[in-house]
Image (tube, helix red, strand yellow):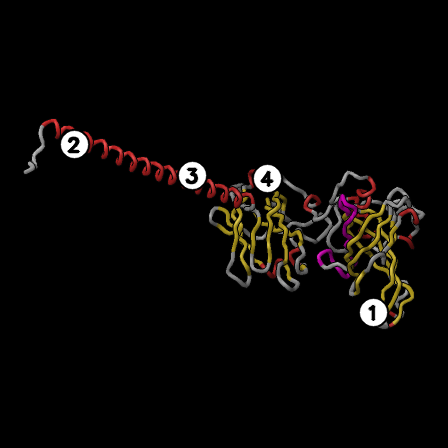
Amino acid sequence: MHSCCLSGSGWVYWFSAGWCVFKTIWEGIMKQSKMRILCLLLTAVMLLSLTACGKDKKEENSNVMKFDDCELVYKSACIMDDFDGNDALVVTLDFTNTSSSNESYLWTLSETAIQNGEELEIATVYVSEDSFDTVIDSQFDDVAPGKTLEVKSAFVLKDMSKVEVTFEESFGSKSNKITIDPSTLSRGSASSTSNTGKNPTQTGSEMKDWWNGDWYGWWKMTECAGYYEGMDDSRWDICGVIDIKSDNTGTVTLWDEDYSKSNPMAEASVSLLDDGMGEHGTMISKSGRFTNIDLSQEDWVVNPVAMEVDDLICIDGYYENGEDEFYYEIYLRPWGLYWDELDANSRPAYYDSWYVPMIESGEYMPDSIG
């Protein structure tokens, strides 16, 4: 009969063998645990990295504020004097209409500025000393779907402490905020807040950059029929922006006294041809619209060399809509140039009373005429 008791040497042997097996199993478990812990640590680090990246991305786009029917981009701010001589915070924004109908900034959003727990009053800041137009007037302009308009807001400051500006939907629940520190801002002037400036696109090409910028002039109708009968030689002042990109394609936007930059009379996609016809080339239309009719390829063919005066272009075309028709001629010069070498009949109607005073006071081209 076998005994259940181990002898001294046998016990030591089996204990040693058992310990080796236990140690091997335990080390395996610990290795697996360490691997699990290491994996968990690596996962945590990756999640933290992703979180940090997401935060950085959000901070990079913190100036973009999205709403149901529009998008707002905070561009800049400066300090200006209001009509009473008080310091005013003037905020510049890009307002993009993402709805399906014409909308204005003022109708779409409401704004509130808070400083030291108190709401700031809206400031009246005139664009020039001899004008009753204010820097916030573009808030009233209608913006077509998909289009962007630069607008400004102005608030009377109490001191130079931080200001929190809240933008809320007029007919919704979304809101966004920005915080501005007036103590870090420079002081601006009315002319420095203009929405437009010469040469919006600098391509490095002398030919392209000659076209780029703000233009001013006049246009007339001839050989009128239908609804326009009797309006031959009627004339209107007109403003425009030409923007040619480095690939020789671009846009032309025109508005007269009855329109505005945000609601233009004509918009065209154009190409600039280096066809050897003068140093400035030839600009042709590709598509677009003139008032309520479409523009097609080469409806506009504009070559400055055809003009007898330097820095003058003529855009001519034909309008036909049923029985309504007329020919039109649009004469433009870069904003800021005088028309002294042309007689009075070849100058815009508001040249002396409106245009000359503006350029002599250093004003940029406004978004509407008169």
Q: Nearer the viewer, mark 1 or mark 3?
A: 3
In the image, residue 95 lies at what x, y percent?
63, 54
- The residue range painted magenta reads 244-262
What is the three-letter code of the residue carrying label 4? Leu
Q: Which is nearer the N-term, disc 4 or disc 3?
A: 3
What is the three-letter code of the residue carrying label 2? Trp
Q: Nearer the viewer, mark 3 or mark 2?
A: 2
Q: Which residue is mark 2?
A: 14
Q: Residue at x 64, y 62 (%)?
A: 103
Q: Circle 1 — which element?
A: strand
In the image, residue 75 lies at what x, y percent?
62, 46
Measure the C-alpha gap from mark 1 to mark 3: 67 Å
Circle 4/circle 1 CB separation < 8 Å? no
Q: Which residue is mark 3?
A: 45
User: Which image quadrant for residue 277?
Assistant: top right
Checking the image for residue 321, the label placed there is 1
